[in-house]
């Protein structure tokens, strides 16, 4: 990537995430109207306004880059540099007044995820990483936990019904039985908890590309692993598994078995 430095992209991503988060916060716990999209997922004016803000900032700074966002789709498809946006990951939490939602921004070049930002406005937390630059959590280095036994691990997920919809309930049950604790601190916050050492495993049986792109560089730079359900380090596999390093292989075996 000699022709493109990651530093300007990371600076933009961090600033834009905070600005979009401020927009979303203005709607948070305000009784904002909720619509249902064709995939039956909820959406609000906060989602759309936050994504529009992110797109404006990218267009101003990098007008030749492609963008893929949850609310407004793809632009400049085929460009070597691309941004992936989820303005509010965890809209279901957002509309119920729970603070466990976040702004997700990722940047990739030639299909390689190079940086990710997870910003949680209602919690005052930001987790980010760039290739070779390490992972960070509110300005301090972030790293996964050193737990190396499944029987001591904390398992996270969003909604158990998702495993049934994806036909993965048997593997999910194996993981549940093998781990010590389980909590439904889900969506992107669950992956952030793994990256910062506060949990060991986060499972997403169904995941869109804009939900996954920021996670791979963050987990890897934090010393952990992000793969699809088949154990492939990919943001395009339609699923996501975040683990610390000590449990990555054990989790993969259980998911495949």
Image (cartoon, rainbow, N blue to C red):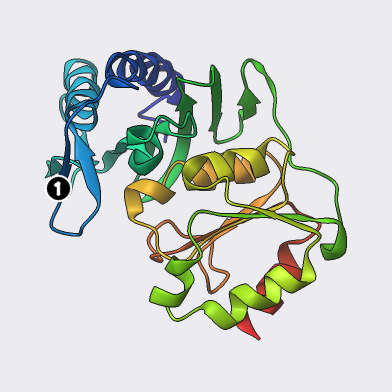
* Residue projecting furthest to the bottom: 257
**Identity of the residue drawn at 17% across and 20% down:** 56
Using residue 134 as the reference point, say whether residue 11 is left or right of it.
Answer: left
Residue 66, image x, y percentages:
20, 38
Residue 15, image x, y percentages:
38, 13
**Identity of the residue drawn at 66% across and 72% down:** 252
Relative to 14, say whether 107 is above or below: below
Which secondary structure, mark 1? loop
Count of numbered circles in the view: 1
Using residue 149 as the reference point, say whether residue 54 is left or right of it.
Answer: left
Place residue 28 in its image quadrant. Answer: top left
Residue 228, image x, y percentages:
50, 65
Look at the image and tell me whether residue 110 can be seen: no
Look at the image and tell me whether residue 120 can be seen: yes
Instruction: Name the residue that disc number 1 marks.
Output: 77
Q: Is 103 or 56 nearer to us in this picture? A: 103
Instruction: Give the quarter of the figure containing the N terminus.
Output: top left
Q: Is 252 or 232 nearer to us in this picture? A: 252
**Identity of the residue drawn at 12% across and 41% down:** 76
Using residue 21 as the reference point, say whether residue 143 is left or right of it.
Answer: right
């Amino acid at each position: 990537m000699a022709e493109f430095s990651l530093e300007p992209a990371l600076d933009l991503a961090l600033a834009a995430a905070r600005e979009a988060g401020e927009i979303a916060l203005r709607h948070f716990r305000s009784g904002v109207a909720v619509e249902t999209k064709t995939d039956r997922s909820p959406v609000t004016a906060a989602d759309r306004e936050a994504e529009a803000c992110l797109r404006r900032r990218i267009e101003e700074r990098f007008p030749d880059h492609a963008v893929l966002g949850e609310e407004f789709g793809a632009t400049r498809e085929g460009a070597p540099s691309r941004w992936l946006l989820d303005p509010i990951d965890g809209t279901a939490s957002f509309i119920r007044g729970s603070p466990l939602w976040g702004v997700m921004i990722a940047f990739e070049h030639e299909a390689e995820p190079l940086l990710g930002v997870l910003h949680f406005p209602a919690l005052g937390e930001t987790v980010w990483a760039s290739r070779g630059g390490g992972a960070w959590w509110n300005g301090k280095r972030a790293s996964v936990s050193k737990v190396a036994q499944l029987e001591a691990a904390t398992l996270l997920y969003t909604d158990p019904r998702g495993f049934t919809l994806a036909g993965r309930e048997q593997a999910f049950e194996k993981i549940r039985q093998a781990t010590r604790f389980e909590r439904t601190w889900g969506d992107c916050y669950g992956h952030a908890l793994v990256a910062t050492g506060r949990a060991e495993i986060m499972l997403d049986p169904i995941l869109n590309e804009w939900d996954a792109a920021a996670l791979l560089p963050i987990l890897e730079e934090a010393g952990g692993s992000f793969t699809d359900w088949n154990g492939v380090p990919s943001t395009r596999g339609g699923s996501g598994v975040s683990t610390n390093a000590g449990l990555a292989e054990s989790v993969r075996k259980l998911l495949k078995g």
